[in-house]
Amino acid sequence: MMRVLVTGGAGFIGSNLVEALLKDERVSFVRVLDNLSTGFLKNIEPYMTDPRFEFLEGDIRDFDTCKKAVEGIDVITHQAALGSVPRSIYDPLTTNGVNITGALNVFTAAKEAGIKRVVYAASSSTYGDHPGLPKVEDIIGNPLSPYAVTKYVNELYARVYASLYQMEFVGLRYFNIFGPRQNPNGPYAAVIPLFAEALINQKPPTINGDGSHSRDFTFVANAVQANILSLFSKNKEAVNQVYNIACGEQTSLLELFNGLNKEAKTTLQPIFGPERLGDVKHSLADISKAKQLLGYNPLVSVEEGLKVTFGWYKKKFEV
């Protein structure tokens, strides 16, 4: 029976993970640490009355807060971060503070508390300018944004801490995770909630570029599965590794828009805008390593995930 800390647990991926952990018979307690800068209390409100759940409002940039958060904890899944390539270009200092200093605080608090295993959210942005497809974990290029730098530094620190302090780290390189609870508001929202909100409101969404940019879009349940497998894996070869967490399928932005348009039953056409600075043109994951060592198997396809996600946004936005 494990006691689990989820940093960033009021956020999009974190709250979906909390929901799954509280249903897992191997888990006796879940604590969330979140400063609510990009997460929302409403995401974890259903669990507030559960005696196995605790919410701690605080910032991972404060080491004392991290030390408090790890008290009595067995394993950590570190999801707290400032996402978004554009945000990191606009404000690299804050991205660095949260994603590097914050992660280092969590890793160090875990070390001092004697917590052996830490699972952390890595990123496909680490592949940078390397043109090869599909992306394989041990072949990366140069980072194209401050955000990409921060997520690669997390991997470097995890490797060093594992070596120096006999800890177990598992890095999950997420590929464009989407699903319910992903926030469509704000200047740095991800593309799927933006498209969904626009179509529900009968407005043509803007596509950055000509629509040919492609991504390995991955439904959030698959990311949750990867985290739980990583937290509880008894395979010694599975730890101190990084893994691609994706579906292993390539979808262009135009194909994505057409899929959502079909769900929305509209004939709207997108507006094409300028490409975003720091964006990778194409992304596709090789997920064979995660399958082999973790037993990862993405159960929800992009098409199925879009149906679920669009249905969730429809309930949210329709009055």
Image (cartoon, rainbow, N blue to C red):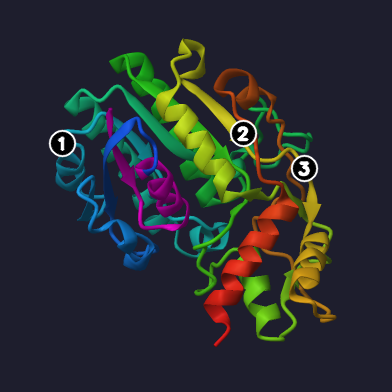
Q: Which residue is labeled 1 in the image?
A: 71
Q: Is disc 3 surrounded by few (<14), some (14 to 19) or many (20+) residues within 10 Å?
A: some
Circles 2 and 3 in contact, beta carbons < 8 Å: no
Q: Quadrant of residue 66?
A: top left
Assess disc 1: are there few (<14), some (14-19) or many (≥20) residues with their C-alpha within 10 Å of its C-alpha: some
- Residue at screen point 74% across, 41% down: 284
- Disc 3 marks which residue? 249
From the image, tell me which residue sits under label 2: 244
Dot 2 crowding, Cα within 10 Å, few <14, some 14–19, many 20+:
many
**Is disc 2 placed on a helix, strand or loop?**
strand
Q: CA distance from mark 1 to mark 3?
A: 40 Å
Q: Earlier in the sequence, mark 2 or mark 3?
A: 2
Which segment is the magenta one?
A: 1-22
Dot 1 or dot 3, earlier in sequence? 1
Quarter holding the N terminus is top left
Which residue type does callout 2 highlight? Asn
**Residue 9 is a magenta residue:** yes
Asked if 113 appears above or below 120 in the picture, the reply is above
314, 69: nearer the viewer = 314
Task: Judge from the rendering whether residue 138 lies leftward or rightward of residue 202; answer left or right.
Answer: left
Where's residue 249, x and y in %? 77, 42
Res 44 visible: yes
Left/right of residue 125 with respect to residue 155 in the rendered view: right
Residue contact between numbered discs 1 and 2, judged by CB atoms under 8 Å: no
Measured in 3D between alpha carbons, the distance from the residue under mark 1 to the one under mark 2, in whole angstroms, is: 30 Å
Instruction: Write down the quadrant of residue 157 in the picture.
Output: top left
Give the alpha-carbon distance from disc 2 to disc 3, as whole Å.
Answer: 12 Å
